[in-house]
Image (cartoon, rainbow, N blue to C red):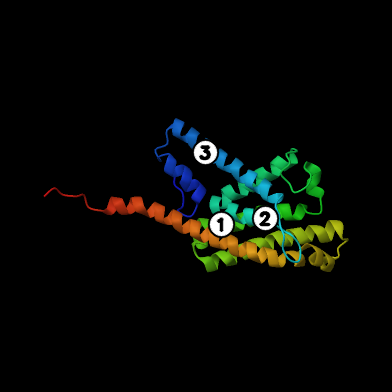
């Protein structure tokens, strides 16, 4: 089992356990991923309850956490983390910003929650291909991912809450958050590019060591 150098979560577990896949090592590897998944959902839950004073409305940190989940875990694992987070909320764990249970997915904010799944997939797809190592590409990817959150969030508001009034849905569900999300995009891209470079260098070191000719005794 191999992991791309830009998938830090996979690299972390892979570095701890060697790649020769005995049953015991695969078990510990699976447990390691499970721990990382649960830790990531805990981060998402904490970020849902954190608000930072900002203009024109307080800024929540959950979209930032979603972008970073995609960057750290990659596409498939990143989407799995978000789905696990939603499942935790559906069964009643207090991981959402307010409330829990299946009925919460009929809340006015439900579209944004579903947008988190797509956003993590978009960023993870880019991270799996090393695009997030570049700050410029990272900003572009994070912007596209954030746009998917807005798309589903505003669409849900317009169709289920505001009687098809898309203009009002945009005014309420998008415009007040643009400035704060622009800041989160910049932070997420900066953190993702730095982390991807560190992981790439860490992966390159063993390969360079293998290419070094053996030392000869004089």
Q: Nearer the viewer, mark 1 or mark 2?
A: 2
Q: Residue at x 71, y 66 (%)?
A: 178
Disc 3 packing (10 Å; few <14; some 14–19; many ≥20): some
Q: Residue at x 48, y 55 (%)?
A: 6
Q: Which label belongs to residue 125? A: 1
Disc 1 packing (10 Å; few <14; some 14–19; many ≥20): many
Q: Which residue is mark 3?
A: 32
Disc 2 packing (10 Å; few <14; some 14–19; many ≥20): some
Upstream in sequence: badge 3 or badge 2: 3
Q: Based on the displayed image, in which of its 4 quarters is residue 198 positioned?
A: bottom left
Q: Is residue 218 left or right of residue 74?
A: left
**Residue 195 in sight in this render:** yes
Upstream in sequence: badge 3 or badge 1: 3
Farthest residue, direction right = 163
Pinpoint residue 133: horizontal percent, then vertical percent.
49, 62
What distance separates the C-alpha of mark 3 from that of mark 1? 22 Å
Q: Which label belongs to residue 61? A: 2
Farthest residue, direction front = 53
Upstream in sequence: badge 1 or badge 2: 2
Circles 3 and 1: CB distance less than 8 Å?
A: no
């Amino acid at each position: 089992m191999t992991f791309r150098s830009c998938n830090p979560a996979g690299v972390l577990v892979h570095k701890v356990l060697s790649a020769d896949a005995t049953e015991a090592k695969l078990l510990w590897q699976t447990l390691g991923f499970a721990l990382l998944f649960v830790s990531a959902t805990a981060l998402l839950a904490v970020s849902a309850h954190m608000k930072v004073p900002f203009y024109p409305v307080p800024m929540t940190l959950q979209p930032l956490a979603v972008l970073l989940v995609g960057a750290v875990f990659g596409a498939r694992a990143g989407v799995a983390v978000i789905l696990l987070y939603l499942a935790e909320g559906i069964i009643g764990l207090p991981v959402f910003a307010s409330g829990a249970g299946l009925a919460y997915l009929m809340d006015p904010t439900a579209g944004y929650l579903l947008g988190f799944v797509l956003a993590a997939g978009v960023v993870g797809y880019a991270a799996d291909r090393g695009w997030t190592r570049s700050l410029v590409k990272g900003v572009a990817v994070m912007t596209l991912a954030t746009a998917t959150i807005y798309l589903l969030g505003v669409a849900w508001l317009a169709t289920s809450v505001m009687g098809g009034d898309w203009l009002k849905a945009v005014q309420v569900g998008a415009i007040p958050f643009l400035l704060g999300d622009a800041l989160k995009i910049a932070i997420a891209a900066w953190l993702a590019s730095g982390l991807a470079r560190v992981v790439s260098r860490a992966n390159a070191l063993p390969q360079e060591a293998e290419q070094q000719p053996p030392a000869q005794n004089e």
